[in-house]
Amino acid sequence: MEAPIYHLDKVVKAKQEDMEDFDGPLDLILHLLSKNKIEIRDIVISDLLDQYLDWMARREKLNLEVASEFVTMAAHLVYIKTRMLLSIDDEVAMSEMEELMAALEEHKSQETYVKIKDVTGPLSGRYEFGRDYLAKPPEPVKADNTYRYVHDRGDLLSAIRSVLARTDSRLPPPAAAFEGIVGREPYPVADKARSILDRLVQFGVARFRALFKTSRSRSEVVATFLAILELCKANRIHLAGTAEDCTVTSTVDDGPGEIDVTVESY
Amino acid sequence: MDLKELESAIEGILFAAGDPVPVERICLTLGQDRDTVDSVCQRLADYYSYERRGIRLVHLEASWQMCSAPEQAAYIRKTLENRRPAKLSQPALEVLAIIAYFQPVTRAYIEQIRGVDSSYTVGLLLERELICEAGRLSVPGRPMQFKTTKTFLRSFGLASLDDLPELPSATQEEAQLTMQLESALQRLQQAETEEPEEAPPPEGEGSE
Amino acid sequence: MDLKELESAIEGILFAAGDPVPVERICLTLGQDRDTVDSVCQRLADYYSYERRGIRLVHLEASWQMCSAPEQAAYIRKTLENRRPAKLSQPALEVLAIIAYFQPVTRAYIEQIRGVDSSYTVGLLLERELICEAGRLSVPGRPMQFKTTKTFLRSFGLASLDDLPELPSATQEEAQLTMQLESALQRLQQAETEEPEEAPPPEGEGSE
């Protein structure tokens, strides 16, 4: 069977002439193809034709020419489809179908474009006014690290349980328990610092090592050393010399005054 | 929380946000239902317009946004040394309209309708935040799709996409025919899907 | 330009700016003198505070700035922070549980129980304000101790530490022992602090 020569371009262009009705079926086919997202090979073309002829029949003025054009087109569709169904590999049929699809899509695009162009006028008018609604930049939100997750208190219990399970329920004695034994604080660092300053005010200068001479315990040595460090940090005393021979002088002349120490005592 | 407190909280939230804030978000924060929040926002909006204040509340889809009163735009631009955004060109309006009415769409779709390369215009609309990306289409090449933004709605005085002016429609006759055809098609499709998958009809059957 | 119009224009300008706007700038835009602009701004500022609106005007040197009302800060933060509150990890929960049940404790104590370095986790809990410092322990090295906070109580729905779920019984015995030790210790510490500061105990006494 020889393929009928069918010029799609003509069909599409027919609208410009007096055959406006072609708009109908073409649009319908397009509509069905695109809106229902179906493939042209899935369309039952005879039904499409039936529907269309039905519609034509009900028209007061039956434009025979238009109807016959439509029938020709529909017939061609049927023909193409038949070939495709009979032989999926019929490349000619496939390409004809592609061509038809492309022509249909083109037609639809043009239709859409006309509509879109129509609507740009009103849209432009709206923008004329709307673009004067000015937005402002968001206010910076201050970061807040506070924990806000809401827990069940049972979460704590299960957490401590899993800790205890690992340690066999044996806990080290709290450090506080040793406080009474190792933590006595007989040597407040501030007091040590004050006595060092007193000494410097009185004698003007002292040897570094001499400051430790009266220390009778390791704790007292540490407290004295901490006091010297604190005084250096506060710029109250000045150390000079070598590791072997180091002298300590006061940087201020007017007595001890307030000493702000970070370590209270040792 | 009384009305006065609600109003103040919502005013503070919308001011600080700058951007549109979804109603649901405000409901969650304030522990109020949607109707309450929407009505307080509407009250505020009415109050701003009626009292001709320098600020406005606009309703964009399910969000509220605080913005400046359009009457003050000239003074604001002058103070902040901002230029008034240029009118959109015809091509830009066309691309924007295509995206607005058929979103989400790919650039290829826009170009198919317009028949010309539209990448520059799409870029421009993206830059002006009138459109934004809307995920990739799952077809070969995975092209990006675009949709309109809340800025688009605000700039065109639309509360939602439903407020877009209607596209010129097909003639009534056509519309009716379309409907008939669609229903016929649906019946056909139903009939087809009801057939057992294991035994498809012989090829070609029912097509002619 | 009447007062009402001036107010509206200034409101619009300060709203859209967000940042502080120099008075001079507003004067220039509106063609008004400085006193007029300042007084209109002040009027607006007073109106916002008096009416307890959600926004405020603040005067910073020679500028005015619109900002959200501080009373609304919590609601604003809650609305604009889109993150869902993060949940503590299991290790963090464990450290928190140890601190909660045995507070005040040192980091060394926690590590002794867990057998792993816990400095990061302790830092995290401090940052989240679930724990806070609770003074240094008077032992060599003077380590910092930690205790739980009110945020902790709130996060776990506890009215007080007495509401903590009871520990498994074996540990309770130990806890009681600890309590006894602690009270003994407290007595000792009290005794010490009652000694006048001016007269420390004779050097060397009781030190070794």
Image (spheres, coloured by chain):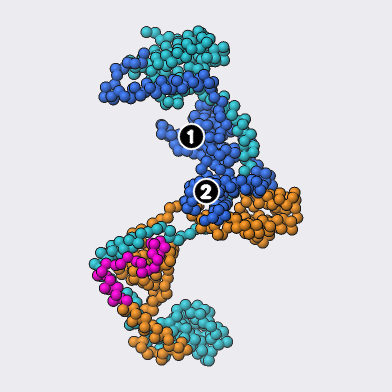
Chain colours: A cyan, B blue, C orange
One can see residue A23 in this view: yes
Q: Quadrant of the C terminus of chain B?
A: top left
Mark 2 residue crowding within 10 angstroms, few (<14) / some (14–19) / many (20+) = many
Nearer the observer, C17 or A96 = C17
Magenta extent? C153-179
The residue at the point 63 percent across, 48 percent down is: B48
Toward the viewer: A249 or A256?
A: A256
Q: Residue at x 47, y 51 (%)?
A: B28
Amino acid type assigned to the residue bearing label 2 in the image? Val
Other residues around mark 1 within 10 Å, as few (<14) / some (14–19) / many (≥20) = many
Q: Quadrant of residue A39?
A: top left
Mark 1 vs mark 2, foreground winner is 2
Q: CA distance from mark 1 to mark 2?
A: 30 Å
- Mark 1 or mark 2: which comes first in sequence? 2
- Identity of the amino acid at label 1? Pro
- Residue C167 magenta: yes
Where residue C139 appears, as percent x and y from the top left, is 37, 78
Say which chain tag 2 marks.
Answer: B
Residue name at image x 34 percent, y 18 percent: A88
C157 is higher (above) or lower (below) than C11: below
Q: Position of residue A198 (x, y in %)?
A: 51, 89
Tag of residue C108: none
Q: Residue at x 43, y 64 (%)?
A: C151
Question: What residue would you read off at disc 1?
Answer: B104
Residue A80, position in %: x, y? 39, 14
Query: Regarding mark 1 in the picture, which secondary structure is present there?
Result: loop
Q: Is residue A247 visible?
A: no
> Residue B95: x, y in percent?
55, 32
Residue sitting at the far front: B2
Query: Which secondary structure lies at badge 2?
Result: helix
| Residue A206 higher or lower than A44, as above or below | below
Q: Which residue position holds label 2?
A: B37
